[in-house]
Amino acid sequence: MDKLYLKDVEIFANHGVFQEEKSLGQKFIMSLELDVDLREAAVTGDLSKSVHYGELCHNIEKEFQKESYDLIETAAEKVAEYILYNYDLVNGVKVLLKKPWAPIGRHLDTAAVEIYRKWNKAYISIGSNIGEKEDNINMAIEKLKEVNEIKVTKVSSIIETEPWGYENQDSFKNAAIEIKTFLNPRELMTILLNIEKEMKRERIIKWGPRIIDLDIILFDDYITSDDYVTIPHPRMEEREFVLVPLNEIAPNLIHPLTKKRIFRMLSEIQNL
């Protein structure tokens, strides 16, 4: 990925824990490193295919001065979020924020934090077999769209499937969505669990009836063994109700463990 840099931009703002910092303000020095594909801009000379760094410089100054934060960690986070929200061409951003006048009673060159945030791509499986099943799925998708840190980029059609694991229950409706997010997997899992809770999901029987079921299937190339969120989702390669809608929106996606594409895994279980 190509890079675009803004280095050592001086901004006067009112961030800090102490009241004097908030009232008097101080100098901050910010550097940005943007992940941007610059090929088309370079070939065509079209500025709209790149990031106008003069405009960006003025915009981040306004954003940085808009509120007063106790921590430079928060200030850096807000700048990264602003850039990702407002500049569609930017895939990732590194923010280096220096505080050369940090009031610590000692001589120092600068105190600083550096963060990196990027858009991650994740795939979520959605299922329901209680009540108005399609309405439940569409409601869950709308709730995800309301989350600032998430952009829903693809939605599969809704299919009907037989129950898996615990068969003494009604048939399911299932779908899959692709999202962009700069949340990490645990943060995303918390969002999904909160939506399930809002929609009154009850966990009584394993694999039993549920008004809504939201699972992270894949998250970039992450491989985790975290009990809170396991990625790739366990046994996804055995579950047609997961693979059919996923194949509709991402047939060439590669499973990071099996190294097989989604369409290949679906073909294998359908031909058993």
Image (cartoon, rainbow, N blue to C red):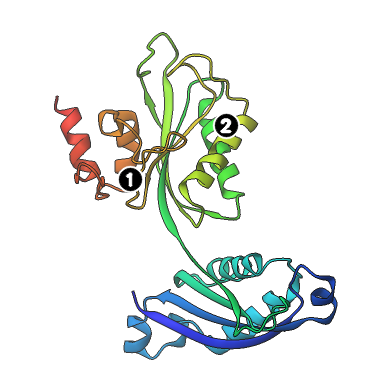
Say above or below: 93 vs 253. Answer: below
Q: Which residue is mark 1?
A: 223
Query: Counting other residues with Cα less than 10 Å from the Cα at mark 1, is it few (<14), some (14-19), or many (20 or more)?
Result: some
What type is the residue that disc 1 sits on? Ile
Say above or below: 46 vs 209. Answer: below
Q: Residue at x 37, y 11 (%)?
A: 167
Q: Which residue is mark 2?
A: 196
Report helix, strand or loop for mark 2: helix
Report helix, strand or loop for mark 1: loop
Provide residue 118's location: percent of width, then percent of height: 46, 63
- Front in this rendered view, residue 83 or 15: 15
Q: CA distance from mark 1 to mark 2?
A: 24 Å
Q: Which label sits on residue 254? A: none
Provide residue 103's location: percent of width, then percent of height: 73, 77
| Mark 1 or 2, nearer chain start | 2
Q: Residue at x 33, y 40 (%)?
A: 232
